[in-house]
Structures are given as structure tokens and as C-alpha cells.
């Protein structure tokens, strides 16, 4: 691996860390505190709505693409979005979590909007600077950044919050975001692709044209279902541990540190595996792993929940989710149109976020109604459904055909897509 490749991977890792650590902290601390204050699981599930900007970010993704004629232009979007993101994070620290809850929620939505914009630009930046053979490892960096961010945000920071409090931690988070921008500020290995012409026809309705591609339906449904068999378990794992009697510090270590560390470690093997075997050959592996996770958690409900069994389940859960993420990101990069990298990749990831949001919200209601065992059983059923549908949804000809091209204005340019 050359110096230029390492520079690319490190830059991408730092960018995904910058957005994921604060987001993970907001998504983790508040649900745990709410459960300790006896909020219902259904209410905790509804809290996931703060992530709504990540669901609708496809609406402004064409603006980012249209105004970005090179990887350098995407870098400008990244820097401006992250500076605003850091400012909002610092401002949240001046409000009290108990008395200013509504204000904090509003600021969190604004912060998530800034991070969603950064994510659009970062994904397009990655597609442009990574060569085809580098994408699986590049997506490992994306997933690793996300899971390391979760490790720090939901594990380390939750413990620090327990000891140091709200304001100092939020101010440190803002500073961290700024430090994480240093690698991209000095990044020099930009793509030299000429892509100005293809961006002149970008429409605000570009996401509509994306869905007009031939045979796109199966691909979209595959993305929508891919995580569905484990997201409910992932969403409810911390409330589950609370109800089993674990303290906040122990939960922070088991799920926030140990679990996400397992996930982060498995992203690199997943990327190497996909690079060697190819997307077409590895598509079956990850849904099978997700089914195994659901089976294990059903088994867990019939035990006395010995600590070592909890650790095994958490390790399996986060590892399966991390490896699935690498696969989904790599697959998504294969289905982007030239000049619309940010828009098309964003649409595909939004589909997975939308699925995750729906499952996360429903998981609280289901667990409240039929208990955790019922939730795990439903997740198993969804996982098995994915395996049954996989031969119909993942069609080799879609990913290899030269005919896959959307109905869009004349003059737009699209690359041929093949999977190595």
C-alpha cells in the first residue's frame, strides 16, 4: 500500500470520525438518561426522529453536486459544514439537559443537518479520489470511522459525562471536530477527472431520475431490507441492558466500547474479503451473519443472561452490522452516475437510513407490546425473508449491464459500471 493510498484512507477516516463521534454521543446519552428516568421504550424509539435530516438530505444533495466541479470543491463543502457543526455543538453545551431539553433537541436537529451536508460532500469526495480497487478498503475506513466514533461517543464519552458533566464535554467535542478537519485541509491528492460538463444538467429533481434507472427497484429494495434483520436489536440493546439491571458505566463499556470496538475491528477484514471475492460473490455472507445474530439473541432470552453470554451477543451484533455496512457502501458506489456522485450515493444510503429509522421506531413499540423475545423473533423473520428474496433482488445483470441508465436530460454523461 503506497503513501498516497494511506493518505486517502487516513483523510476519510478523520472525516467520518468528525461527524460520527458527536452524533453518537447525542444518540446515546439521551436515550440512556430517558430510560433511567422511566421513559417508555416507545418514547425512546421516537427520539430517533432527530436523525430526520439524514433521511431527507437527498433534497439538497443535487445542490452540493451542482456547485462542486472537482474534489477540491467538495472539500469546501466539507470544511464549511463541519465548522458550522462544531459551532452548534459548542452552543449546545451552554444549555441544561434537564431544563432546556426542547432547545437542545432543536439544536441537535440543526447539527445533524450540518453533518448530513458534510456526509454528502464526503461520500462524493471519496468516490472521486478512490480508484475502483481502493473502494472496498475506503469503505472500510468509512465504516471504521463510524464505529470508532460510536465507540468513543457512546462508550468513552458516556463514562466521561458521568464524571465530568455536560458543558465541558460538549466544548471538547467541538474542538475535536475542528482538529479532525486538519487532514482534509492539507489533502493534495485530488482527482484530476474532468467532470464539469456532466454537472451542467443537474436538476433539483435528480433523485427522481435516479429511480428511473432500469432494474433499479430490486437494488433499492435490497438496500431497504439489508440491515432490517438486526437494526431493531441494535436499537434496543442499551434499554435491554438497562432492564437487565446493568448500570450506566457497565452499559457504556459493554455496548459502547466493547461492542463498537468489535465492529470497528471487523471493518478491515470485511473490506479485504470484498476486495478479494468481489461484491457478487460476497453478497450472501452478510445476510447469513445477520440471521445468526437474531438466532443468538432469541437463545439469550432463554438463559440467565450470564455476563459472558452478553459479551458474545454484543460482539456478534456489532461485528455483523459493521461488516454489512462495508458491503452496502461498496455496493452503493457501484451505482452512481457521473457528475452525480454525491446525490446518487446519498439516495442509496438514505434508503438504508429510512429503513433503520422505521425499524428503530417500531422496535420500541414491539418490545413494549410483546417483550424483547418477540422483537428478536420478528427480526429473525425479517432476516430469513431477506435470504429468500436475495436471488430476486440481487441480479447480476443489473450491476454489469451497460443498459442501466436513467431517463434524464440529453447531454448527461454516465460511466459504465462493472464489479471487479
Image (cartoon, grey):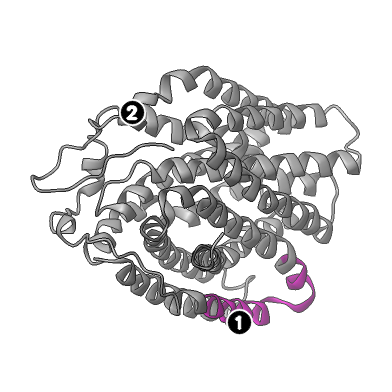
As drawn, the residue found furthest toward the front would be 2
- Placement of 272 over or under 372, stated as above or below: below
Left or right, residue 113 beside residue 366 = left
Residue 330 spot, x, y in % from top left: 47, 44
Residue 85 spot, x, y in % from top left: 46, 73
**Number of marks drawn:** 2
- Placement of 130 over or under 299, stated as above or below: below
The magenta segment: 158-180
Q: Is residue 30 visible?
A: no
Q: Does the magenta stretch mainly form a helix, a strand or a loop?
A: helix
Left or right, residue 158 beside residue 235 = right
Residue 324 spot, x, y in % from top left: 57, 40
Left or right, residue 409 beside residue 236 = left
Q: Which residue is mark 2?
A: 398
Q: Which residue is mark 1?
A: 171
Quadrant housing the N terminus: bottom right
Question: Image quadrant of residue 14?
Answer: bottom right
* Foreground: disc 1 or disc 2: 2
Kindly identify the residue that appears in the image at 21 percent across and 41 percent down: 209
Kindly identify the residue that appears in the image at 35 percent across and 46 percent down: 347
Amino acid at each position: 500500500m503506497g503513501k498516497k493510498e494511506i493518505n486517502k484512507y487516513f483523510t476519510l477516516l478523520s472525516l467520518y470520525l468528525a461527524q460520527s463521534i458527536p452524533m453518537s454521543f447525542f444518540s446515546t446519552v439521551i436515550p440512556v438518561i430517558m430510560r433511567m428516568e422511566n421513559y417508555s421504550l416507545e418514547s425512546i424509539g421516537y427520539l430517533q426522529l432527530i436523525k430526520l435530516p439524514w433521511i431527507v438530505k437527498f433534497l439538497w444533495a443535487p445542490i452540493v453536486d451542482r456547485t462542486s466541479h472537482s474534489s477540491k470543491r467538495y472539500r469546501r463543502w466539507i470544511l464549511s459544514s463541519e465548522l458550522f457543526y462544531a459551532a452548534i455543538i459548542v452552543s449546545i453545551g451552554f444549555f441544561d439537559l434537564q431544563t432546556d431539553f426542547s432547545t437542545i433537541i432543536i439544536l441537535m436537529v440543526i447539527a445533524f443537518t450540518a453533518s448530513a451536508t458534510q456526509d454528502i460532500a464526503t461520500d462524493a469526495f471519496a468516490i472521486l479520489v478512490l480508484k475502483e480497487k481502493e473502494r472496498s478498503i475506503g469503505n472500510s475506513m468509512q465504516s471504521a470511522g463510524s464505529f470508532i466514533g460510536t465507540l468513543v461517543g457512546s462508550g468513552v464519552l458516556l463514562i466521561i459525562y458521568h464524571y465530568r458533566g455536560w458543558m465541558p464535554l460538549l466544548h471538547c467535542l467541538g474542538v475535536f471536530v475542528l482538529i479532525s478537519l486538519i487532514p482534509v485541509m492539507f489533502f493534495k491528492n485530488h482527482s484530476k477527472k474532468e467532470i464539469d460538463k456532466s454537472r451542467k444538467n443537474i436538476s433539483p429533481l435528480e433523485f427522481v431520475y435516479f429511480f428511473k434507472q432500469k432494474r433499479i427497484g430490486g437494488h433499492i429494495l435490497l438496500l431497504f431490507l439489508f440491515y432490517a434483520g438486526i437494526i431493531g436489536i441494535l436499537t434496543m440493546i442499551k434499554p435491554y441492558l438497562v432492564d437487565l439491571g446493568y448500570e450506566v458505566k457497565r452499559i457504556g463499556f459493554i455496548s459502547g466500547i466493547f461492542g463498537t470496538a468489535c465492529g470497528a475491528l471487523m471493518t478491515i477484514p470485511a473490506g479485504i474479503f470484498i476486495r478479494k471475492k468481489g461484491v457478487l460473490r460476497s453478497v450472501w455472507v452478510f445476510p447469513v451473519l445477520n440471521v445468526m445474530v437474531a438466532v443468538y439473541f432469541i437463545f439469550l432470552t432463554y438463559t440467565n443472561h450470564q455476563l459472558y453470554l452478553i459479551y458474545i451477543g454484543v460482539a456478534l451484533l456489532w461485528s455483523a452490522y459493521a461488516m454489512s455496512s462495508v458491503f452496502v457502501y461498496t455496493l452503493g458506489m457501484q451505482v452512481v452516475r457521473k457528475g452525480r456522485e454525491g446525490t446518487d450515493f446519498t439516495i442509496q444510503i438514505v434508503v438504508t437510513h429510512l429503513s433503520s429509522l422505521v425499524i428503530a421506531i417500531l422496535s420500541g413499540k414491539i418490545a413494549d407490546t410483546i417483550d424483547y423475545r418477540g422483537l428478536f423473533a420478528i427480526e429473525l423473520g425479517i432476516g430469513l425473508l431477506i435470504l429468500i428474496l436475495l436471488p430476486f433482488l440481487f441480479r447480476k445483470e443489473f450491476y454489469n449491464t451497460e443498459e442501466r441508465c436513467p431517463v434524464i436530460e440529453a447531454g448527461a454523461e454516465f460511466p459504465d459500471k462493472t464489479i471487479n
